[in-house]
Amino acid sequence: MKLTAKSVALIPIIATVATAAIGATLIAPPVANAATTLAAAAQQSGRYFGTAVAASRLSDSTYAGILNREFDMVTAENEMKMDATEPNQNQFSYGNADRIVNQARSQGKRIRGHALAWHSQQPGWMQNMSGTALRNAMLNHVTQVATYYRGKIYAWDVVNEAFADGSSGARRDSNLQRTGNDWIEAAFRAARTADPGAKLCYNDYNTDDWSHAKTQAVYRMVQDFKSRGVPIDCVGLQSHFNSQSPVPSNYQTTLQNFANLGVDVQITELDIEGSGSTQAQNYQRVTQACLAVARCTGITVWGIRDTDSWRASGTPLLFDGSGNKKAAYNSTLDALNAGGGPGPTTTTTTTTTTTTSNDPGTGGCSATVSLNQWNEGFVATIKVTAGSTALRGWTVSTTLSNGTVTGSWSATRSGNSGTVNWTNVDYNANVPAGGSTEFGFQGSGNGSGLNPSCTAR
Ligand code: G2I
């Protein structure tokens, strides 16, 4: 074909149309009974689709209407942060967070808790603290807030944004980091004790590209936590994208590699600046990447309408300022409806209760186990309860027929499979009459049939 000025001018248009067509063919055409909301479409593969919510917008009927219709997971955008929940030391304030939690629960939605410990958004009193006083204040905050919401949170961002940007792969300098490198694991242990049923996540941004030093550093920390039995269940990739920080080509690899460590992966704060078909294709790619990774359990977008966004000028969300569905909404919904891979491994939580032969009513103790089992492994949390006499020490015997202990906390153990005995550590030896304490362990294989039995020492 001879290129005239007119036909040259047409090339970009043809190219754009062609790209859009290629994008559209990446996903299967909607099936006959395709779900019509993001939540329903995600549920088809056992996943969730969530959004950040601001308490101040709940009275906006357009906003609340979209929230109730489209999403089945909710994150408080600011209301559960440290400055909001503990404005004065040891004075906790849950009004706005409760508004979000109650609204979500009344609509049958689940809640991601964001965030227990973070260098940013600290209340003024905490910003100037250091050393042991700060470490204790942070642990107290984690314990108090996670205890207050115990049983109501699907997953907590226990620690947020603790790694430095750039090529160092180092921890971010902060007052919390200066309390000692173990501040992160200390926070996770406190959170596990306070709310054993919640998944505990590490959450960060710029951790989407597998080749980035920050991604590698977070990966190594999670790997280390898993090997030492620090209780961590999930990694949150915030995934704030724009032209300076585009969706990386290896995004799915990153999700898969984290999942391979034995943790769930969640896309926790997704927004992608842009518009039209380019933005739609980017949302589609992110959605497909999650669907392709069995342990990518859900996606949360960081707001509902473009005008609700922390960076509204980049129009990064799925609904326009009037609440209309954008092209990005349609491509996301279609990708969810098309599926793309096996759903997340079903996590079965079974709770067995065993009472010991020594009647706790006349002294002695009893032990119960809460088991979180997935395909390759498990986490067991064991609760030791004193009878009518205070305990001065205890031993719990468990049976692990088809699994191996890989790590434990808050107890000393003998053996790692078969009959495994657990003895108190110094700080949890004393349990008042009728009171209880917990320890836990994780392992590979199957953790069922533990049948814990407790003996007072
Ligand atoms: O910055 C985007 C997100 C990055 N990851 C962690 C998230 O927690 C973070 O969310 C944003 C919120 O979307 C903003 O809404 O975090 C910002 C600050 O931590 C939030 O901004 C704050 C402003 O700084 C305050 O001045 C303002 O009062 O929002 C507050 C409520 O609008």
Image (cartoon, rainbow, N blue to C red):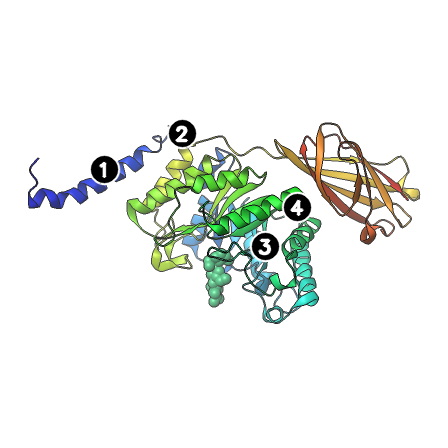
Q: In this view, does 192 lie to the left or right of 264?
A: right
Among the 4 quarters of the image, the one containing residue 171: bottom right
Instruction: Look at the picture and state if 420 lies above or below 197.
Output: above
Of 214 and 452, nearer the camera is 214
Queried on whether the Cβ of the residue with tag 2 lies below 8 angstroms from ligand 1, the answer reads no
Circles 1, 2 touching at the beta carbon (< 8 Å) = no
How dense is the environment of label 4, judged by Cα within 10 Å: few (below 14), some, or many (20 and up)? many
Total labels drawn: 4
Q: How many angstroms separate mark 1 from mark 2 (CA)?
A: 28 Å
Residue highlighted by disc 4: 231
First along the sequence among labels 1 and 4: 1
The residue positioned 39% from the left and 42% from the top of the image is 249
Mark 2, mark 3: which one is toward the viewer? 3
Secondary structure of the residue carrying numbered label 2: loop
Position of the N terminus by quadrant: top left
First along the sequence among labels 1 and 2: 1
Say what amino acid the circle numbered 3 marks. Val
The disc placed on residue 33 is: 2
Say what amino acid the circle numbered 2 marks. Asn
Secondary structure of the residue carrying numbered label 1: helix
List x then y, in percent, for residue 129: 64, 70
Say what amino acid the circle numbered 4 marks. Pro
The disc placed on residue 159 is: 3
Say what amino acid the circle numbered 1 marks. Ala
Residue highlighted by disc 1: 18
Q: How many angstroms separate mark 2 from mark 3 (CA)?
A: 40 Å
Among the 4 quarters of the image, the one containing residue 144: bottom right
